[in-house]
Image (tube, rainbow, N blue to C red):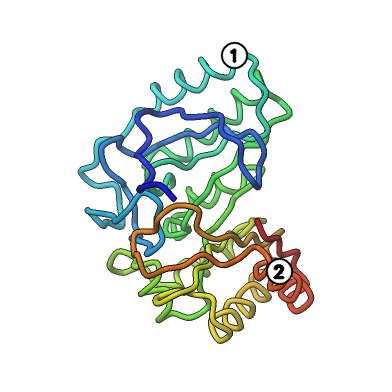
Amino acid sequence: MSAFLALKSGIIYGPVSSRRFGMSLGINLSPTKRKLCSMNCVYCQYGPTEILQATAKDAELPKLSDVIWSLEQVLKQDTHLDQITFSGNGEPTMHPEFPDMVEWAIQLRNRFMPKAKVAVLSNGTMLGNADVRTACDKLDRCVIKVDCGRAETFLRYNRPAKGITLESVLDGAKQLKRFYTETLLTAGRGGNSNPDERAAWTEIIKELKPVEAHIYSIDRPPAVGTLKLVSREMMNKWAREATDTTGVTVKAF
């Protein structure tokens, strides 16, 4: 493993080959000098969140016009893409113009790359905002982070900003028309993959009924060094068991 992943240096990055989504072009709506995130997850590949905040207040963010221009320049090059993904140096839905950016990304996709999906990878902390939910419902794939099934585990594993709870994230997800979940599993001290944690998570997935539930593990040094990789063989086993228990297709990557 190498050191922490470097922050994205601009608005558009990639395309990169994704284990889940094929050739994916990233859109970074966060600052380029620090993470803008409402969580400080123990496993984050970008390292610790130095300024933990629940909103984008006082953050220097890319403008809507710059995002539109940057995305158009790449898409009109006729590069093969499977997906255009809002992700980047933090939580993309924290950007106050996220709904407008979704509208423009879909328009540009339709114009230049009609077969590509448009997606967001989100921690779900902004789903209490109706405009954010409406934007997410327009996407081909809205992927919500659900790492834990217990409130106390959520607090120590995802380490959210003040006022954010597991219940608030799940309540927001339940109001979406359709969504996927993603779960990063870790072993070792501070992990989330012991039998009790997996059982609690399974019950949450059974309740949420996402289109699919994706599980995977770390491939770079996590923010907390005591965490360990969960083997692919073990994840495959858990995915099969969770699929049988929940009725949801659970895939290991």
Horizontal relation, residue 207 to residue 197: left or right: right
Question: Do the numbered discs 1 and 2 sit on residues whose CB atoms are within 8 Å?
Answer: no
Horizontal relation, residue 216 to residue 159: left or right: right
Q: Which residue is mark 1?
A: 76
Where is residue 104 drawn, in percent x and y? 53, 28
Residue at image coords 43%, 56%: 126
Residue at image coords 48%, 48%: 131
Mark toward the viewer: 1 or 2: 2
Q: Which residue is mark 2?
A: 239
Q: How many marks?
A: 2
Horizontal relation, residue 228 to residue 24: left or right: left
The residue most toward the bottom is 196
The residue nearer to you, when weighing 139 against 10, is: 10
Residue 185, relative to residue 62: is it above or below? below
Where is residue 76 drawn, in percent x and y? 59, 13
What is the distance, in whole Å, between disc 1 and disc 2 at their CAs? 39 Å
Is tag 1's residue or tag 2's residue first in the polypeptide sequence? 1
Q: Quadrant of residue 166?
A: bottom left
Circle 1 SS class: loop
Residue 178, relative to residue 95: is it above or below? below
- What is the three-letter code of the residue carrying label 2? Ala
Q: Quadrant of residue 65?
A: top left
**Quadrant containing the C terminus in the rendered view:** bottom right
Could you classify mark 2 by the number of other residues whose Cα lies within 10 Å: few (under 14), some (14-19), or many (20 or more)? many
Residue 104, relative to residue 150: is it above or below? above
Residue at image coords 34%, 64%: 224
The residue nearer to you, when weighing 123 against 137, is: 123
Where is residue 218 drawn, in percent x and y? 50, 58
